[in-house]
Image (cartoon, rainbow, N blue to C red):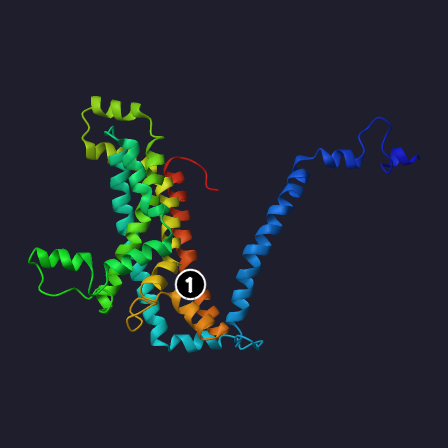
Amino acid sequence: MTDAAMGTRPIPGEPSAWTRLKTNRNWLGFWFMIPAAAFLLLFLAYPLGLGIWLSLTDARIGRPGQFVGLENFEWLSDDPVFWLSVFNTLLYTGVASVFKFAIGLYLAILLNHHLPFKAFLRAIVLLPFIVPTVLSAIAFWWIYDPQFSIISWTLRQLGLISSNIDFLGDPWNARWSVIFANIWRGVPFVAITLLAGLQTVPPSLYEAATIDGASRWQMFRHITYPLLTPIIAVVMTFSVLFTFTDFQLIWAITRGGPVNATHLMATLSYQRAILGGYLGEGAAIATAMIPFLLAAIMVSWFGLQRRKWQQGEADD
């Protein structure tokens, strides 16, 4: 029996194995994915893995650490400052995300209508988003100044208060102050993204609903909201992730004070790891953020799957 007959040599005129390999779409797709996979492994997976490994060691700056298992997490479970940072992070993320969504959705619907100077108004809405975070934090630090605050001056001129408000010296005042600053910065992202989603809703649906006598609330409930749900899920997922991991705004305004009242998990992790030198402990605080972030992603993912199921589509 010849080699060609046994399948070990290509039959004359038949494409070689290498030629078939070059024209195989799955194989070509695999090779094209390698650069992106290498990039993700190098800049995302490696730092994440290194951070988790450091959380299991007693590493300090200038000294290699030894494996200590879950000792850092056991120590953190008895640390009241850590639990205070967890509370602050959840409060900061929850309140800011709700207000950013409500205000952003309202602005998106408003800017979707025909208004005079609509392009100018959209540019104005974007201003807080394009200002550097540190610059806006310094502006808010000046607005919240205990002596020269424009808010306190205005309220005193109106006769509503007799003395200046201590925005950043009182624990709860400081919490609400940084939450307000985060809302101010985050609303443009939500508003502009939802506005882009509203632009994709066919006007014919609203015209048909108007002919049927639907009210504005009914049009929002049965047309706008269902079509906007996938975009809302994506936008709010990113908004929650950005807010939960916020660092610059808090560090520039309060550095976690007063008495740790505005310390988030991100700022506490930086303080313990970099300023304090306890890399293992700081990494453990950062690693403790992962379950919360995964929960936020899973809520969004299940929400999108449920929406697909309601629309008769198959799950991914």
Q: In screen coordinates, is 8 left or right of 90?
A: right
Q: Residue 44: x and y, percent?
A: 54, 55
> Residue at left 73%, top 35%?
22
Residue occupied by mark 1: 289
Judging depth in this view, the residue of 249 and 83 nearest the camera is: 249
Image quadrant where residue 79 sits: bottom left
Relative to 255, is 14 above or below?
A: above
Question: Which amino acid lies under the numbered mark 1 shown in the image of this protein?
Answer: Met
Circle 1 crowding by C-alpha within 10 Å: few under 14, some 14–19, many from 20:
some
> Residue at left 46%, top 65%?
287
Q: Residue 250: x and y, percent?
A: 34, 62
Numbered label tally: 1
Residue that extends furthest to the right in the rendered view of this protein: 1
Relative to 219, is 136 above or below?
A: below
> Residue at left 36%, top 64%?
251
Relative to 254, is 45 above or below?
A: above
